[in-house]
Amino acid sequence: AQSVAQPEDQVNVAEGNPLTVKCTYSVSGNPYLFWYVQYPNRGLQFLLKYITGDNLVKGSYGFEAEFNKSQTSFHLKKPSALVSDSALYFCAVRDMGRNQGGKLIFGQGTELSVKP
Amino acid sequence: SQTIHQWPATLVQPVGSPLSLECTVEGTSNPNLYWYRQAAGRGLQLLFYSVGIGQISSEVPQNLSASRPQDRQFILSSKKLLLSDSGFYLCAWRLYRSNYGYTFGSGTRLTVV
């Protein structure tokens, strides 16, 4: 079965410092990986995806993620955190099984708190 | 451009009452459609997905049902709400057979009292 794990419930970072939100996955075959962000009482917003190609993926709002096949990880990173980055972040993997409608399997989410 | 509409934004319903949440997508054809529930502000649980009109796949047996009467319309329903149905309901769509991720609606906050 395919799954995603976000080992940290919460990440605290000082503004201006680099941030990392961790994600590991378990899939059969090549993974399609995604990061989303959710602000309070809002829908999820797409940040970036990895399908194939360069292991370093750049996305919205200065975020990037590094795909590491040997470690089955897809960590989200940003060189310099902003207070406005504070939100709930979700990692997801597409279920590549047949007749699964391309559904996404989400991690439990990581609450990012950036303090001034 | 494609947009997704979800309504209402908030809903307070008594236990035992019916439910109907609607989601529509504009600017695309034959989208894959999904209903998720988010409880306690964290994990997302896939409830239903649909790859075409009248085609509904249920992920979790529960008090809810879904229908897709038109290509770009996805409805989540219940005949009798339970307290445990409270949560944040999110609709999403994806272009059929594309490598893109989902686009989510703005969500409906349902409180069953």
Image (cartoon, rainbow, N blue to C red):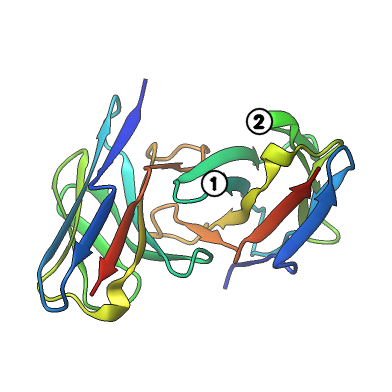
What's under tag 1, amino acid-wise?
A: Tyr
**Relative depth, front residue between B76 and B72:** B76
Residue toward you, A31 or B49: B49
- For this rendering, which residue is in front, B52 or B104? B104
CA distance for labels 1 and 2: 15 Å
Give the residue number, with chain letter if any, for mark 1. Answer: A39
Q: Position of residue A56 (x, y in %)?
A: 81, 37
Residue type at the position of mark 2 = Ser
Judge the density around disc 1: few (<14), some (14-19), many (≥20) Cα neighbours within 10 Å.
Answer: some
Q: Residue at x 81, y 42 (%)?
A: A116
Mark 1 or 2, nearer chain start: 1
Question: Mark 2 — residue?
Answer: A60
Given contact means CB atoms under 8 Å apart, are the residues at marks 1 and 2 in contact? no
What residue appears at the point 78 percent right and 52 percent down from the top-left corner?
Answer: A75
Question: Where residue B75 appears, x then y in whole percent?
Answer: 18, 53
Residue A70, given in percent of the width and then of the height, sits at 86, 59
Q: Secondary structure at mark 1?
A: loop
User: In the picture shown, does residue A56 fall above or below B58?
Assistant: above
* Badge nearest the viewer, 1 or 2: 1
Check the picture and name the quadrant holding the C terminus of chain B.
bottom left
Name the element at disc 2.
helix
**Residue B31 position in % (x across, y down):** 31, 39
